[in-house]
Image (cartoon, rainbow, N blue to C red):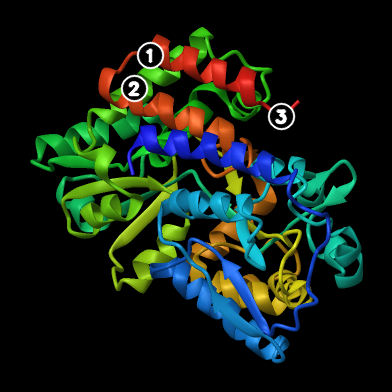
Amino acid sequence: MRFSRRAAVAVVGAAALFATAACGNGNSGGGSGSKNVEVFTWWADGGEKAGLDGLVNQFKSACSNYEFQNGAIAGGAGSNAKQVLASRLQQNDPPDTFQAHAGAELSDYINAGQVEDLSSEYQDWGLKDAFPKGLIDNLTVDGKIYSVPANIHRANVVWSNKSVVSKAGITSDPKTLDEFIADLDKLKSKGVATPLALGKDWTQLMLLESVLITDLGPEKFSGLWTGSTDWKGADVTKGVEDFKKLLSYSNKDRDTFDWTDAEKLVMDGKAAYQLMGDWEAADLDAKGFKDYGYFPFPGNGNTFQWLADSFVLPKNAKNADGTKCWLKTVGSAEGQKAFNTKKGSIPARTDANPADYPQYQQTAIAAWKSATQVPSCAHGAACSQGMQGAAASALGKFSSDQNAAQLQNAMAAGIAQFAKK
């Protein structure tokens, strides 16, 4: 799916969400007597599917009187799933629960009155004590909580093919953007056609965000999504020019690639690096590729760009009681361990034992506790679906024309239209 289509989907999807509010009767349903619990996600393969399978096994143990029904729709970052979900919500045919990124992305569903308040369940299940206060504050909208996060992911991580990097004579991970560019030049001079593998729309937004964290610092970067930092400023212009420079080291067919296609370039030794969230660790492990390294994007320093996958209780869900059992499992210590040890993410709960997790997750758990936290727009923590669509459209154009001023103007216009007030 190309950028223009993604942008259209986001806008149409958001419109559909608001239109549905007029159709719902405000009831949560659950009286059908069905034992099935349809869980709608975009976790269809690789490490994502492995994580879902782990959570499903825990659900079957904790909620044996219900049956898991897999509603997964494949597509990186949910681009395809969100389109299908918007159609189903418009037709008043919601799944029993659906995956959504925690944060601003949920605002469309909340404003449309399409998801139930889970505040009392948080109290009953002890989640207000299990999750860190900062996360609870992020999840709370006008005093209410509408989703249960299954995890925390880090977005600003660079993954490498260690053999490709080593053969080019690179012996250490770059700490600054200038060092990273020097390494990319070295790889190119050694005959590596694609020093930096890249995919389409949201993957390019992820790369731009990491560059802007480096050039602006965490506070000004976060201000880009609230309107307190000017997208048209000279410091943002520098960031866009740095991003443009990085595009010159990427594959020319990037606009046709999903993130897994770019990942395959790294696995096959055709590329050296890829900027991607830390679900890549579990995906590479699940695919049997072990020759990889990882480091925070150069210049991001002690900044942890976060996102979280969460689940909601839709209004008019056919099996509300079964959904609540699923949500309780998602938030439980056992459920988060079963899910995150396979997904590559870390638990949202603070009572997890790092020793239960593979090496990468142990480093991420430590970083989550000590690093400066900033939200991801590409994955909904900082941006509504409308803003994500506007950003994807702007970056699709920039990928072709490389016009920095037009990109900055488009992003500024998107924030003015979609920023959460």
Report x, y in % for residue 50. Answer: 46, 75
* The one of 297 and 39 positioned closer to us in this rendering: 39
Left or right side of 120 for 257: left
Along the polypeptide, which appears first: circle 1 or circle 2? 2
Q: Which numbered marker is on residue 398? A: 2
Quick check: can you spot residue 358?
Answer: no
Amino acid type shown at disc 1: Ala
Q: Which numbered marker is on residue 404? A: 1
Question: Marks 1 and 2: CB-CB under 8 Å?
Answer: yes
Report x, y in % for residue 127. Answer: 83, 65
Q: CA distance from mark 1 to mark 2?
A: 7 Å
Q: Which numbered marker is on residue 420? A: 3
Amino acid type shown at disc 2: Phe
Amino acid type shown at disc 3: Lys
Q: Judge the density around disc 1: few (<14), some (14-19), many (≥20) Cα neighbours within 10 Å.
A: some
Report x, y in % for residue 2. Answer: 33, 39
Left or right side of 232 for 365: right
> Within the image, what quadrant is residue 228 found in?
top right
Q: Judge the density around disc 2: few (<14), some (14-19), many (≥20) Cα neighbours within 10 Å.
A: some
